[in-house]
Image: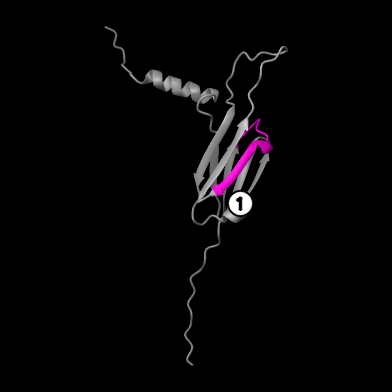
Amino acid sequence: MKLTRFEPFRIADLLHNDLGRTGTASGWQPATDIIEYKDAFLVRLDLPGVESSAIEISTDKGILSISGERAAFENSEEATLTRRERASGRFDRRFSLPEMADVDAIRAQSKDGILEVRIPKIPEVQARKITVEAA
């Protein structure tokens, strides 16, 4: 007797995965690393094929937003796409910034398909003892 596993949502999972991979319906999300140093945070996104002029970075109310677009291959008389595995279209990533982030000093640079956003930390204010002098 052969047993078959019943997975009622399997087709929905396959559809969701396929839409996410093509980038046509749900967009795509670049792989991201967040590294914390003693004095800063570094957000690294894999963005091969995305021009730096197509990337938008902003902060608002403690949220860092990074968005952009990777152009899709367009068929022409000379070439026809026969397989598509690379996502294209718009992407949007949002990250909550910690209170210690210095949003006025955030810097970004793109090199070799990797976007690096450096977020410096505000130096911690050291508690100090105040001596009361006799008048």
Question: How many labels sit on residues?
Answer: 1
When the figure is inspected, residue 100 is found, relative to residue 132, above or below; the finding is above
* Residue appearing at x 54%, y 40% in the figure: 33
Residue pictured at 58% horizontal, 31% vertical: 90
- Label 1: few (<14), some (14–19) or many (≥20) C-alpha neighbours in 10 Å: some
- Give the residue at the far right of this rendering: 78
Q: Tag 1's secondary structure?
A: loop
Is residue 31 something one can see in this rendering? Answer: no
Compared to residue 79, the image places residue 106 above or below, namely below
Give the residue at x 31% y 16%: 6
Residue 50 in sight: yes
Which image quarter is the N terminus in? top left
Query: Over which residues does the magenta segment extend?
Result: 46-59
Q: Position of residue 85 (x, y in %)?
A: 57, 21
* Residue 28 x/y as whole percent: 54, 30
Q: Nearer the viewer, residue 98 or 19?
A: 19
Residue 72, by quadrant, is top right
Residue 55 sits inside the magenta stretch: yes
The residue drawn where x is 59% and y is 24% is 86
Amino acid type of the residue that numbered disc 1 sits on in the rendered structure: Ile
Q: According to the image, label 1 marks what residue?
A: 106
The x and y percentages for residue 74 are: 66, 19
When the figure is inspected, residue 87 is found, relative to residue 105, above or below; the finding is: above
Q: Nearer the viewer, residue 98 or 112?
A: 98
* Location of residue 121 by image quarter: bottom right
